[in-house]
Image: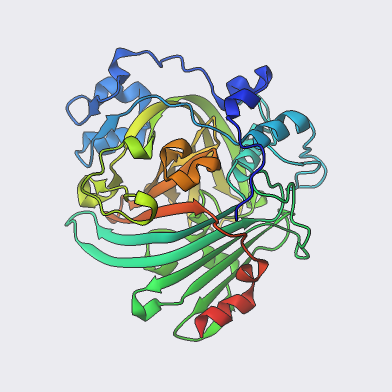
Amino acid sequence: MVVFAGAVGASAQEAPALAAEFSPVLVDGDSPLLKSGATVGSDNVDQYSPWLDEVVAERIRAGDFQLTLGPGLKFPTHPRYIQATERHAGEPDLDSEPGELAAYEGGRPFPGLTASDPQSGVKAAWNMRYAYAPDEIETAHFIWRYRDMASGKLERTLKMYGAILRYAYRHSHDPVPALEDNPAQLFSAMYLRVNSPLDIRNTQLLIHRALKDSAPEQAWLYLNTQRRVKRIATGQKTDAFLGSDIMIEDFLGYNGRIIDMEWTLLGSNELLLPMYAHSQLDLGGQEISEGGYRDIPFAGAGACFPAVTWQLRKVFHLQAVPRDSRHPLSKRHYIIDAATFSPVLTRIYDRGGQLWKLGMVALSHSDYHTPGNKPWQGVITDAVSMIDLQARHCTTLNMNTRLAQDPLRHKTFNTSYLRQMGR
């Protein structure tokens, strides 16, 4: 049984000082061009350029896809997270040790960000790392598809299971604020297992994210062909994961140490993002999975673009430049939804500074998802696309992520479990 506390509407819990933080007022929100149902295509994209990321506008202009606007929604944030933000505002400290965040207890570490703050970049990175998400989630319906963008050919389909457990800074599941049994001093752990196809079935990935950002990174891979657990070296986290267009470092927007990047907050504005109410989308032709859920379709060139509605959101632009000159990327440019601190769009640049990939995350309002996810009280990722613009190839992810039906066990997130499941 899942246990939740504070399961009330987030708006009732917002202090006046935080209202604009979690539900910013949009300057252009009443523009007649942005009415629900409007379509943005190659013939009218220039009219919408003030509200489009430049790479998204280029893809629309080139005819790779078009987007449709949906109704404006206020997305919720769990009340415990908002309360923790208010309670601990001003406490986190960046200056104790390089790369560390001292005195953080929960909620958003640094509300009220402005680009004029010389430390705003790394503060935004910590806000993204500790953005609200439920403490125990699993994805039993998790489908990866590899696609040729030029021909539209579907090359490979993987079916997986995934789970994430937060050990510390918990807000949604009891016990709060932390699990007592945490000898490895973890913030969170992620587990992935391939269920099909047969040639890589039971391949598994385990990632530990430490409380101390300066601690060595810990990740392990179980390869069914070798029947052994292998520690993943830091350099391997930028390799293509299972032949996809996605790196392990790309998971959850950025799955790496904050200390390993130079972070710069470039500013904020208002842009259209793929955020919507899942149950209000027209998905009649999609197959129904658990709980009446229908997968998000993909459309456009190669079926690489999630076919959801977009709405105007306040965003932050955050740049991450690797400190290690051997890193295969020169930078990442994140477009982060300011209310939720979710990285919704990501531009990835190769070592030579050329645009390489575009990442897109489709986010649903939890009140308009499966009935069991209503207590989620936040944004739910329904679909992801990582598009290699140089190779004209993409990897798309469909997922029906749910609040864990039973408490997740520590044993799932250790290397002995990898061996057990691989037998």
- Relative to residue 338, is residue 284 drawn left or right? left
Total number of numbered discs in the rendering: 0
Vertical order, 384 against 127 (above or below): below
User: Eyeballing the image, is 182 above or below 10?
Assistant: below
As drawn, is 307 to the left or to the right of 315? left
In the displayed image of the protein, which residue is found farthest to the front? 1
Q: Give residue 284's quadrant in the image.
A: top left
Percent position (x, y) of residue 202? 45, 77
Residue 316 in percent (x, y) is at 52, 31
Residue 351 visible from this viewpoint: no
Q: Is residue 12 visible?
A: yes
* Vertical position of residue 169 compared to residue 75: above or below: below
Residue 234 in percent (x, y) is at 59, 65
Residue at x 55%, y 46% (from the top left corner): 321
Would residue 236 be found to the left or right of residue 307 on screen? right
Between 179 and 25, the one lying in front of the other is 179
Residue found 38% across the figure and 32% down from its top: 53
| Residue at position x 77%, y 37% in the image | 92
Which x, y percent locates residue 118?
A: 68, 30
Residue 404 to residue 309: above or below = below
Nearer to the camera, 290 or 233: 290
Identify the image quadrant of the N terminus.
bottom right
Decide which of 6, 145 is in the foreground and name it.
6
Viewer-closest of 140 and 70:
140
